[in-house]
Amino acid sequence: MDRPLLRDEAPSTRPLLEGETPRAHYKTFTHKEVREAEKRYVRTLKNKRLFVAAFAAVLGAFNFGFALVYPSPVIPALENNKDPVITITSKETSWFGSVFALGSIAGGLSAMFLNDFLGRKLSIMFSAIPSAVGYALMAGAQNVWMLLLGRILTGFAGGLTSAAIPVYVSEISHSGVRGFLGACPQIMAVTGALILYALGLLLPWRWLAVAGIVPVLTMLIMLCFMPYSPRFLLSKGKDEEALKALEWLRGKDTKYREEFERIEESLNQGTKITWTELRDPYYYKPLLITVFMRFLQQLSGVTPILVFLESIFNKTKVILDGKYDAALVGLVRLLSVAIAAFSMDKAGRKILLFVSGGLMLASTFSMGMYVHFTSLPQGNSTNHTGDSLTSSTVEPTNYITLIPLFCIMIYIMGYAMGWGPITWLLMSEVLPLRARGVASGLCVLVSWATAFTMIESFIPASEAFGLAVPFFFFAIICIVNLVFTGCCVPETKGRTLEQIESYFRTGRRSFIN
């Protein structure tokens, strides 16, 4: 077989990718044989260092999950706080939950520049600064504005890492473990949320903020010893550094040079995408898929449910205290996303998205029906989490009050199995390398702008119409999720990033099927 052509040599893959007559050496192997060769190569790789590098990066996702749900145990504590300086009103409660999303929007915008300027690794490391400052402000808060500023800063760090971590993990991974490692940001985010719920049972709210600084500093120290993404280094013309980084990740005794040459071939000569090029389906199709997936993910209601989880349980008369229900949901969420991580490279992305969407649809519709038939349809109270649920026409039995807990558990289980981790993973898989830095930041921007709207409108909608209406809305969105998955989302299981790029460039399903 002819040696693969390097980036600087006469036209590499352009004949194949543009539909012209392929060169002779492309006819030698079928797509099936190429995939089998990739599988044989994957079996020779040593993944220990790769897993360490991925773990160091996804500690940022742990911090993101911890910071996101921080208001869940803190809001009830602040409402019952006897200190008049730091008590919180209903309006301030809404802002305390939602300003995190505003910070994440700013972080996503920054990622559009920092991902390509500093690189994925340094962008993740840079997020440690606003994160640590934000936690310090909340730990020592003497008034509400310090709490809000702390939430904005931790949100900024979360938005930045949301764009940088999936790209970094995907680019250092290979096709054999990319599904599992691609789910790791979501696993760590869920773990961070669970740890927050658990610590909320033990620690005062100020010490919860202090605890949040620990994973931030650990991440910063570990990443100092990890390599940059080989694909990012190649895009900057640092070929020798990229080769050393790939050798460190794959092991000296593997055929990493062949993988290096394949990566090099897939790169275009330019390093920055132009607005004119965005009209090319090769760029706009994967961009639209990832942006719309993040949009639908947030419209399905996961962020307001997580942020106000304990308060929702307190108002729906579940047998246990809201804080214990929240911890149980966090545990179910972690187990579900772990199952998804191990099955993603076996079952595939699309089947998990269908299962996920179906469970979310069933649970949100059931929750809406429960609230509708056990509460007055219009909110008669001004309580911030929809006290319409306290105005029951029929007092439910103790067993019936378990329905909200089961519904939220099933919803979170479904989300964690598909629409949580896979939207992160597909963002890093289907976006072309040249557009990956900017596009990932755009995905985060759209995601958190939608999240802010959902969080900020959740309380007013619950007060005005009762809690059933938001959940019925979430159910409708889940139907849209199922249709979108069937019509628009490609299956990327077991495909290299280069094969996925070739599919969008040529439209040939043989690269995916």
Image (cartoon, rainbow, N blue to C red):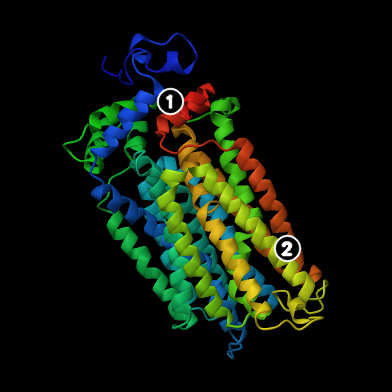
Mark 2 nearby-residue class (10 Å; few <14, some 14–19, many ≥20): many
Mark 1 nearby-residue class (10 Å; few <14, some 14–19, many ≥20): few
Residue nearest the viewer, comparing 83 with 441: 441
Determine whether the residue tagged by mark 2 lies in a helix, strand or loop: helix
Determine whether the residue tagged by mark 1 lies in a helix, strand or loop: loop
In the rendered structure, which amino acid carries the disc numbered 1?
Answer: Gly
Residue nearest the viewer, comparing 91 with 181: 181
Establish if 120 lies above or below 207.
Answer: above
Residue nearest the viewer, comparing 156 with 55: 55
The percent position of residue 436, horizontal first and vertical second, equals 47, 38
Residue position marked by numbered label 1 in the rendering: 270
Q: Nearer the viewer, mark 1 or mark 2?
A: 2
In the rendered structure, which amino acid carries the disc numbered 2?
Answer: Pro
The residue most toward the left is 253
Residue visible at 66% across and 83% down? Answer: 398
State how many labels appear.
2
Residue position marked by numbered label 2 in the rendering: 470
Establish if 38 lies above or below 316.
Answer: above
Identify the image quadrant of residue 82.
Answer: bottom right
Residue nearest the viewer, comparing 386 with 83: 386
